[in-house]
Amino acid sequence: MPLYQHRVRNHEVDSQGFLFNSRYLEVADVAMTEFFRSIGWPYPKLVAEGTDPSVVSAVLSFKSPAYFDDILDVDVKCRNVGNSSFKIDVSIARDGTEVANVELVYVNVDPAEARSRPLPEAVALALDGALQG
């Protein structure tokens, strides 16, 4: 069972009938939230603990188009955990065939100071526990 499933909605497709490229980042963002929920950190708890992840790098690789009404299986793998950052890979597939992959690097941000800050220890430990090579 995938971490998250997304049904492509009509307003998400472009004039060619493909899921518009920017929408893949939206799907990946929801998947990141679901990933944290799956490791015991629902988003409100994550923020209350002092974690406010911001994307600093996104690399999207498109394998084949997704279309209106497709059901996409979305999985997340944690690849790296640093002092204030972490990297995840988001795999988006339809019927077992990869449609796209999104590599994301997040940095924990202090919104008041507009700069990075260390991940809270409990969050970093949960991410470490979810690391996949």
Image (cartoon, helix red, strand yellow):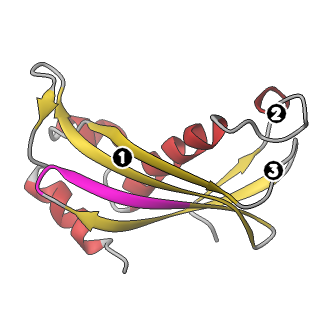
Magenta span has 85?
A: yes
Query: Residue 13 bears which disc, if any?
Result: 2
Q: In this view, does 127 lie to the left or right of 103?
A: left
Badge 2: few (under 14), some or many (20 or more) residues near its Cα, within 10 Å? some
Whether pointer 3 and pointer 1 mark residues with C-beta atoms closer than 8 Å, the reply is no
Residue type at mark 3?
A: Ala
Q: What element carries label 3?
A: loop
Which region shows up in magenta?
83-90
| Residue 131 sits above or below residue 105 on the image | below
Query: Residue 66 bears which disc, if any?
Result: 3
Residue 21: x and y in percent read: 68, 39
Badge 1: few (under 14), some or many (20 or more) residues near its Cα, within 10 Å? some
Q: In which quarter of the image is the N terminus?
A: bottom right
Residue nearest the observer in this picture, 45 or 89: 89
Q: Is mark 2 on a helix, strand or loop?
A: loop
Q: What element carries label 1?
A: loop
